[in-house]
Image (tube, rainbow, N blue to C red):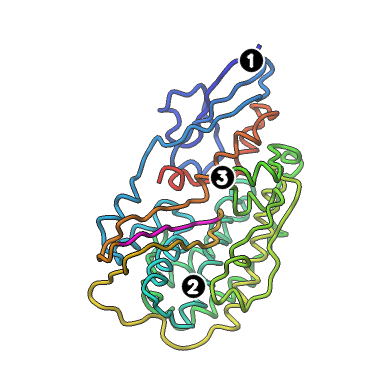
Amino acid sequence: MSEQITVGVGAGARYLGVDRVVDLGPLHPSAHGAYRLRLTVTPDLVITAAEPLVGHLHRGAEKLFEVRDYRQVLTLANRHDWLSAFCNELAVALAVERMTGMDVPARAQWLRVLLCELNRLLAHMVFLTPLAPGAAAYREGVQAVMEEASGGRIHFMFNRIGGLREDVPAGWTSRVAAFLSTVDVERLEIDFARLEGLGVLGTEDALQYGVTGPIGRASGVDFDLRRDDPLPAYRSLEFTPVVRSEGDAAARVRCLLDEVRLSVSLASACLEQLPSGPVNVRLPKAIKAPEGSVYTRVEAPLGTSGVHLSSRGEKTPWRLKLRTPSFNNVQALSALLPGTKVDDLPGVLSSFAVIVGDIDK
């Protein structure tokens, strides 16, 4: 006879009234928050149904945006997914630039793509570190160059409406190139044997739940905004998105590794083609988007990060709605967990990259 149990994920899970807490290892990104899984299990603890329970800490990011001008919005836009900080800033900046018809200098466009790929590399290394401790050195390496460019370690706040806050320091591109030359994912030791066949997410289920990013591509969803709705600089870069068909925990981790290789390649290509010139445009004292609405999206490390901006012609947004990848992706746990043993939950969830702040936005 089946019974129902509730497990909690994250550092705060023990305060949610759960039957047990799933430990994903030290420093795992999902530990910085909490969500619950209501599971129906058989007597031998095999999951037959799963329901993610989220929303325990509503950050109110979208309402905060509505009472700040567009410059101030950018300082908050990177905080709901702290591992995709630069990409989240960029999505908001693109929305305002598109509504105002602003032309961003070429150097800023290329630096944005370069920094997006470094941000992707950083995020993937953070998720890989609990599975392969050797990834921590690469994580610190990319963290160092991102911090040198922006001055921020977590919340970069480097994008500006019309480009970037300032140019990168002298010699920075050489240091980035030197770091990229050291990244070798073949040296990372991961026990794939314990992940094979666990938590399979089929292509149709991934599509129905709107799963994007490496989780979706590991399940055969051939969708990558860097190719399908590219920023200007991406149009000059030739690459093929990483897509796998197995959809299990091992495929999701392998997809992260493959995307690290791809990000290294794209970042290196950006360095080779980086033009000179200004990185921003002169702005008025108050930026006012014209009346209307626009939707912009970027390929953030965990998937599609979208911004729906509605304006009434004022210096603050009338509405700024976020489409965050983790919010959609976490719903897919209902489809992939049935058939999994409770003892295998840590392995499955460690391959399923989500940020709780991105869910509880």
Q: Amino acid at mark 2?
A: Arg
Task: Work out whether mark 3 precedes mark 2 in sequence or the reverse, and give the earlier one.
Answer: 2
Binning the other alpha carbons within 10 Å of mark 2 as few (below 14), some (14 to 19) or many (20 upward) gives many
What element does badge 1 sit on?
Answer: loop
> Could you tell me which residue is drawn at 40 percent across and 67 percent down?
93
Confirm or deny contact between disc 1 and disc 3 (CB under 8 A).
Answer: no
Which residue is painted at 41% across and 85% down in the image?
278
Mark 1 or mark 3: which comes first in sequence?
1
Q: Which mark is residue 2?
A: 1
Residue 309 within the magenta-colored segment of the rendering: yes
For the residue marked with disc 1, what is the amino acid? Answer: Ser
Q: In terms of depth relative to the viewer, which is nearer, 125 or 36?
A: 36
User: Residues in magenta?
Assistant: 304-311
Q: Residue furthest left?
A: 285
Q: Which residue is mark 2?
A: 112
Q: Amino acid at mark 3?
A: Asn
Residue located at (63% from left, 20% from top): 41
Helix, strand or loop for the magenta stretch, by majority: strand
Q: Which residue is mark 3?
A: 329
Q: Position of residue 231 (x, y in %)?
A: 54, 72
